[in-house]
Amino acid sequence: MDIQLKRGLLDVCVLAAIKNEESYGYKIIKDMKPYMEMSESTLYTILKRLETSGLLEVHSAEHNGRLRKYYRITDAGSKRIDEFRDDWKEIMAIYRFVTREDQIND
């Protein structure tokens, strides 16, 4: 898979994981696990990129005597999910075009 496409997909997946409520790294990985595997190092790279892009906000709070970072989606992050949904319709149309011969031969 094209690395840029995969990167964009993973970004949107992380945004979707926190779209309804703020969350923290371990919980994000746990929530995504039924759909995909993601390492902590990959997740934290994505979270940092999304924060830098203004698609999520971060705050720290104490939990069991330790500081934990919590991530919350911004309006721009929600807009990015909406844009992805629109883009996906176009991607699926392209997919149907590319695989049309396969469907005819089946």
Image (cartoon, rainbow, N blue to C red):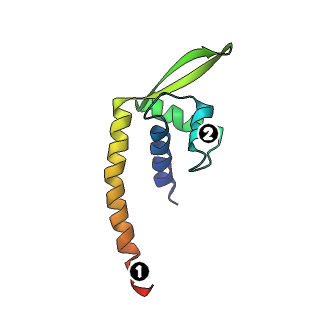
Q: Which mark is residue 63?
A: none
Q: Residue at x 52, y 54 (%)?
A: 3
At label 2, the amino acid type is Lys
Q: Which mark is residue 103?
A: 1
For this view, does 74 lie left or right of residue 18? left
Instruction: Indicate the secondary structure of the residue bearing disc 2.
Output: helix
Q: Earlier in the sequence, mark 1 or mark 2?
A: 2
Instruction: In this rendered view, identify the residue nearer to me: 7 or 30.
Output: 30
Where 104 sits versus 27, above or below? Answer: below
At label 1, the amino acid type is Gln
Snapshot quadrant of residue 16? top left
Q: Residue at x 39, y 68 (%)?
A: 95
Q: Quadrant of the C terminus?
A: bottom left
Measured as percent of width and height from the top left, residue 61 is found at: 57, 15
Instruction: In this rendered view, identify the residue nearer to me: 65 or 5.
Output: 65
* Disc 2: CA contacts within 10 A as few (<14), some (14-19) or many (>=20): some
Question: Outermost residue toward the right?
Answer: 65
Snapshot quadrant of residue 77? top left
Measured as percent of width and height from the top left, residue 38 is found at: 61, 45
Measured as percent of width and height from the top left, residue 39 is found at: 65, 42
Q: How many marks?
A: 2
> Spatial distance from mark 1 to mark 2, Cα to Cα?
36 Å
* Disc 1: CA contacts within 10 A as few (<14), some (14-19) or many (>=20): few
Where 8 sits versus 75, above or below? Answer: below
Measured as percent of width and height from the top left, residue 26 is found at: 63, 33
For this view, does 27 lie left or right of residue 106? right
Instruction: Indicate the secondary structure of the residue bearing disc 1.
Output: helix
Q: Residue at x 36, y 48 (%)?
A: 84
| Mark 1 in CB contact with mark 2 (< 8 angstroms) | no
Find disc 2 in the rendering and name its residue: 30
Q: Residue at x 37, y 63 (%)?
A: 92
